[in-house]
Image (cartoon, rainbow, N blue to C red):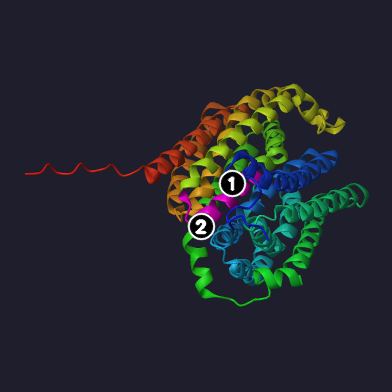
């Protein structure tokens, strides 16, 4: 029997760089496999046509925009799993996950009916609606699978068993890559084939999660056999997850609007944006995994009422984010041209000014790295706000910043000054710096020690 406290998720000191890293690296492998899935989707579709590749980017962004509210609500379960685990209430840790399972099942009829209707509305005037709808509709109809999966992932992350997330993701996403190649290149199914591959892979991941979650060991230790729906357990999801979901919906709506602005700014601009965006999709697993690893530690120490350890966790996350961004810069900048060339076919060269596209992407890289660095910082601090049930502030900041500092300036720059995609990345970088500044100020105000009042002098 281990003598360490329940909120210590690893053998390393709580909140240390080693602990955050030991929880994060298995998640990085998991999220890297997911990033490779999207990368291969676009790479394979790029061999078919530029229109298919661009459609996957725009429709994929729209899919996550539609899914984001239920997805974030489900992801909130990790916070409550971590709190239960931190306070040593192990038998309660599966309760939040069961609420996510019931919620995802309740979403089935909504997404089944909404998928074709949303596709008609979202892609009505893009000029690429056939490809976009073919990618969007199967994924949207399968949204409950993605929602349930994030519930299971949050459970295993909250109790410190991140290697299960890694194993399930690697298995599922290797299958996705193979299926995408088969459906798109050998069965000529285009965007629909890429989406179908994703749906099958997600189903495989759920089977893996369920086989562990419902095992006799987990039923005994974590109470995973208690399948009851509980309004008491659901209320915190709404109070904490509701503002988080709305804030992410605002952010995704901003990204969707941004994509629509760039899609109408010309083929070279949209292609340059797609190529740069693919870099984020391929490398964003660093940010996702690090924020989840740090968030799991924060939730556990909050549950254990050890708030004194929170600054150490945040600083560990910041140091790791700076290190990972530096490594990304070393890998990306010297080989940017080779990355771009992966997507360039003879058909592409016939329709695009390749040198113009490559120039815009290369000009974007420095700003993309700034965007990446501060986006990671913001996500690390978001874990703190979620654990402390302070997500309304995040919602208010997102509501203002995404439109005042992101979409609005880009719309003006593109429509009135003919700005290219590299200029858009400059605006996006400054937007993320401002977002993190707001989060950091809020954190400092909430943790500022009350000033001591000097005792009155004796009469």
Quadrant of the rendering where the N terminus is positioned: bottom right
Q: Nearer the viewer, mark 1 or mark 2?
A: 2
Residue 169, horizontal then vertical, whole percent: 77, 53
What are the residue bounds of the magenta stretch? Answer: 288-307
Quote the CA–CA distance across marks 1 and 2.
Answer: 15 Å
Residue 246, horizontal then vertical, whole percent: 51, 55
The one nearer the camera, 298 or 283, is 298
Q: Which residue is mark 1?
A: 294
The one nearer the camera, 368 or 341, is 368
Q: Which residue is mark 2?
A: 304
Q: Is residue 174 visible?
A: yes
Residue 53, horizontal then vertical, whole percent: 77, 42
- From the viewer's perspective, is 11 left or right of 313? right
The one nearer the camera, 446 or 218, is 218
Asked if residue 293 is among those painted magenta in the image, a careful observer would answer yes
Q: Relative to residue 217, is residue 135 depicted above or below?
A: above
Quadrant of the rendering where the C terminus is positioned: top left
The secondary structure making up most of the magenta span is helix
Asked if residue 459 is among those painted magenta in the image, a careful observer would answer no
Q: Relative to residue 364, is residue 105 depicted above or below?
A: below
Between discs 1 and 2, the one toward the N terminus: 1
Identify the residue at image location x=52%, y=53%. Answer: 301
Secondary-structure class at tag 2: loop
Identify the residue at image location x=71%, y=43%. Answer: 25
Within the image, what quadrant is residue 438 found in? top left
């Amino acid at each position: 029997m281990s003598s360490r406290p329940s909120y210590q998720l690893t053998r390393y000191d709580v909140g240390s760089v080693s602990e955050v890293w030991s929880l994060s690296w298995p998640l990085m492998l998991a999220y890297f496999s997911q990033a490779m899935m999207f990368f291969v989707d676009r790479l394979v579709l790029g061999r078919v046509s530029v229109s298919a590749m661009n459609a996957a980017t725009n429709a994929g962004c729209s899919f996550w925009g539609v899914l984001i509210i239920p997805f974030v609500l489900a992801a909130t379960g990790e916070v409550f799993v971590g709190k239960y685990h931190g306070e040593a209430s192990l038998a309660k840790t599966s309760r939040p996950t069961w609420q996510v399972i019931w919620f995802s099942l309740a979403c089935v009829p909504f997404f089944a009916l909404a998928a074709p209707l949303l596709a008609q509305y979202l892609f009505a005037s893009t000029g690429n609606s056939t490809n976009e709808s073919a990618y969007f509709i199967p994924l949207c109809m399968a949204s409950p699978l993605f929602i349930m999966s994030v519930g299971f992932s949050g459970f295993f992350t909250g109790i410190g068993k991140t290697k299960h997330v890694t194993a399930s993701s690697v298995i599922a996403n290797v299958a996705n890559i193979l299926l995408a190649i088969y459906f798109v290149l050998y069965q000529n199914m285009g965007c629909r084939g890429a989406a179908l591959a994703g749906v099958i892979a997600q189903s495989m991941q759920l089977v893996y999660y369920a086989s562990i979650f419902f095992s006799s060991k987990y039923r005994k230790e974590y109470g995973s056999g208690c399948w009851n729906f509980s309004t008491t357990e659901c209320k915190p999801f709404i109070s904490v997850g509701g503002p988080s979901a709305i804030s992410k919906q605002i952010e995704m709506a901003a990204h969707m609007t941004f994509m629509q602005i760039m899609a109408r700014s010309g083929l070279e601009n949209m292609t340059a944006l797609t190529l740069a965006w693919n870099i984020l999709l391929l490398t964003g697993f660093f940010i996702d995994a690090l924020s989840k690893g740090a968030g799991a530690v924060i939730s556990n120490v909050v549950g254990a009422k050890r708030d004194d350890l929170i600054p150490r966790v945040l600083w560990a996350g910041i140091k790791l984010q700076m290190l990972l961004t530096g490594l990304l810069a070393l890998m990306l900048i010297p080989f940017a041209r080779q990355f771009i060339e992966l997507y360039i076919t003879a058909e592409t060269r016939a329709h695009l000014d390749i040198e113009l596209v490559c120039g815009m992407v290369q000009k974007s890289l420095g700003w993309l790295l700034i965007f990446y660095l501060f986006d990671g910082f913001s996500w690390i601090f978001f874990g703190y706000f979620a654990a402390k049930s302070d997500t309304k502030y995040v919602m208010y900041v997102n509501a203002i910043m995404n439109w005042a500092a992101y979409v609005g300036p880009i719309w003006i720059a593109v429509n009135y000054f003919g700005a290219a995609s590299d200029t858009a990345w400059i605006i996006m970088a400054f937007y993320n710096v401002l977002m993190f500044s707001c989060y950091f100020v809020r954190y400092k105000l909430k943790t500022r020690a009350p000033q001591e009042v000097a005792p009155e002098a004796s009469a």
